[in-house]
């Protein structure tokens, strides 16, 4: 046997094994880096969701929506709640309840049923004309200011400036209404 030749072959194999080990290590590091990048991108993916009507472009992420989306959804929700007649309040209530946060469902349903009964009893209609929309992306709220006209038996009984705040939450690729409340008109 030629020991020098065998030692040379062993050294060559060890060098190759070190090179293969280094290549394997680099591939493992690359895989880990790729996994970290993918995990970081998961939280920042924006899903395109279509509101009831499209007027502006907008974006939504995992738990937030853009101010443009809040404005469009807020206008729609205000229309469902404030622009009602005895004939339209029931079907608008049903549509509205599809957008309500589950823990607020009962309270808003009761409120809308009481309002529907009142409107039907006195034959009243309300018409809301939005004049200003102020969205807060961080708080996922919208303040909507405008003129609310009330008609009883076809005669105008009130024509007041009103402000309402709508609180939203965005989860599960769906916008939910958490609260709808009247504010003093001058509030910001």
Image: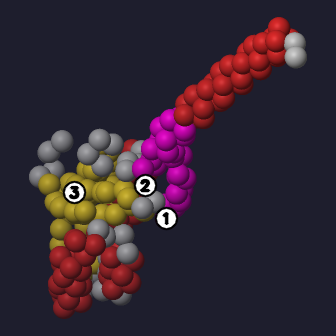
Asked if one can make out residue 46 in the rendered structure from this viewpoint, the answer is yes
According to the picture, the residue beneath numbered tag 3 turns out to be: 164
The residue sitting at 25% across, 76% down in the picture is 105
Which residue occupies 36% across, 56% down?
Answer: 170
- Measure how far apart labels 2 and 3 are at the Cα level: 15 Å
C-alpha gap between disc 3 and disc 1: 20 Å
Q: How was the colour assigned to the protein in this rendering?
A: secondary structure
Q: Residue at x 27, y 50 (%)?
A: 141
Residue identifier under label 1: 52
Upstream in sequence: badge 3 or badge 1: 1
Q: Kindly identify the residue that appears in the image at 77 percent across and 17 percent down.
A: 10
Instruction: Report if residue 151 is visible in the image.
Output: no
- Discs 2, 1 touching: Cβ within 8 Å: yes
Instruction: Label 3, secondary structure: give it.
Output: strand
Q: Given contact means CB atoms under 8 Å apart, are the residues at marks 2 and 3 in contact? A: no
- Circle 2 residue: 72
- Identify which residue, 119 or 174, lies in the foreground: 174
Q: Which residues are magenta?
A: 35-62
Q: Position of residue 87 (x, y in %)?
A: 35, 87
Horizontal side, residue 174 vs residue 114: left or right = right
Give the crowd class for mark 1: few <14, some 14-19, many >=20 residues within 10 Å: few
Residue reaching furthest to the top:
4
């Amino acid at each position: 046997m030629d020991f020098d030749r065998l030692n040379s072959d062993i050294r060559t194999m060890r060098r190759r094994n070190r090179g293969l080990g280094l290549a394997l290590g680099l591939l493992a590091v690359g895989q880990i880096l790729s996994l970290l990048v993918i995990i970081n991108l998961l939280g920042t993916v924006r899903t395109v969701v279509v509101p009831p009507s499209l007027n502006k472009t907008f974006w939504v992420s995992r738990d937030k929506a853009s101010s443009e989306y809040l404005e469009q959804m807020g206008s729609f929700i205000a229309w469902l709640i404030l622009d009602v007649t005895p004939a339209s309040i029931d079907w608008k209530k049903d549509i509205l309840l599809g957008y309500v946060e589950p823990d607020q469902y009962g309270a808003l349903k009761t409120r809308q049923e009481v309002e529907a009964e009142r409107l039907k009893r006195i034959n009243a209609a309300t018409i809301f004309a939005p004049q200003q929309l102020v969205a807060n992306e961080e708080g996922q709220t919208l303040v909507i200011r405008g003129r609310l006209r009330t008609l009883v038996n076809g005669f105008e009984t009130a024509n007041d400036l009103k402000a309402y705040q709508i609180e939203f939450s965005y989860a599960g690729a769906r916008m939910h209404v958490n609260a709808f409340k009247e504010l003093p008109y001058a509030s910001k």
